[in-house]
Image (cartoon, grey):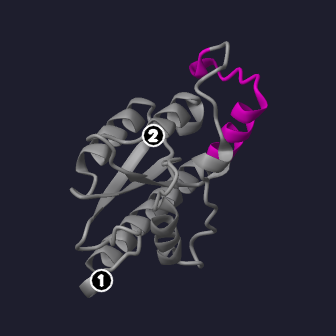
Amino acid sequence: MSSTRPGRIGDKVTSWVSEQADAEHWQVKVLDLAEIDLPFFDEEDMPRNGNYAKPHTQAWASAVFESDAIVVVTPQYNRSFPAPIKNAVDYLFAEWQSKPIGIVGYGWSGAGDARADLAKVLTHVQADVVGDLGLTFPEQLTVDGSVVDAGEVATGELRSLLADLHAKVGDLADARS
């Protein structure tokens, strides 16, 4: 989850995303930036060099590196994504390279600006942004964060995104062997 604001609803959206992940293909681990508590970037060396001196950076690098794929769940604040996710991306470099990533945004406009901006940043650090999904108030999401997916349109789109991520993970595994 990328929002750290009090009263955030990202936990409910993240739970919904996690529930759609087929247990046969995915072992889900939620990385909540409110719990990881990365300070604003405080490493002495540039992330590109990979010389992480701080324990919080080392833990964050391990969590990202060990993930086969990542789904970022983000709201849209002031026409973009929240500062904590930008900070979290900026901490690392090599760990993002070729990492399959999906983006699930939520907000009044489906977080279209946030999803586009985040995809641009992640592509810059050479992550493989596989796709994205936007959830809108009140059509697919209540203001308290409950997903109300009449007709299961968003559920189908999310499952398709997860299938695309799974295929990318398989392609990477094949390339390594």
* Point 31% across, 47% down: residue: 115
Q: Residue at x 36, y 40 (%)?
A: 118
Where residue 88 sits: x, y (%)? 55, 36
Report the front residue among 113 and 165. Answer: 113
**Rendering quarter of residue 143:** bottom left
Image position, residue 95 (x, y; %): 59, 37
x 37%, y 75%: residue? 147
**Can residue 161 be seen at all in this image of the molecule?**
yes
Q: Residue at x 69, y 32 (%)?
A: 57
* 64 drawn magenta: yes
Q: In screen coordinates, is 66 left or right of 48?
A: right
Q: Please say if the residues under marks 2 and 1 sit with CB atoms less than 8 Å apart.
A: no
- Going by the numbered disc 1, the residue's amino acid type is Glu
What residue is shown with label 2? Answer: 127
Structural crowding at the residue carrying mark 1, measured as other residues with C-alpha within 10 Å and reported as few (<14), some (14–19) or many (≥20):
few
Which residue occupies the extreme front position in the image? Answer: 7
Residue 97: tell me if it is visible: no
Residue 152 is marked as 1
Indicate the position of residue 6 as horizontal and vertical percent values.
52, 52
Against 25, residue 66 (above or below) is above
Quadrant housing residue 46 = top right
Q: Is residue 104 left or right of 93 when viewed as pictured?
A: left
The part of the image, by quadrant, that contains residue 28 is bottom right
Q: Nearer the viewer, mark 2 or mark 1?
A: 1
Label 2 crowding class (10 Å Cα cut-off): few <14, some 14-19, many 20+?
many
SS at mark 1 in the image: helix
SS of the residue under disc 2: loop
Estimate the x, y position of residue 174 in percent, counting from the top left: 55, 56
Q: Given the current orientation, which residue lies at the most extreme top position?
A: 44
Q: What stretch is highlighted in magenta?
A: 46-65
Between disc 2 and disc 1, whose residue precedes?
2
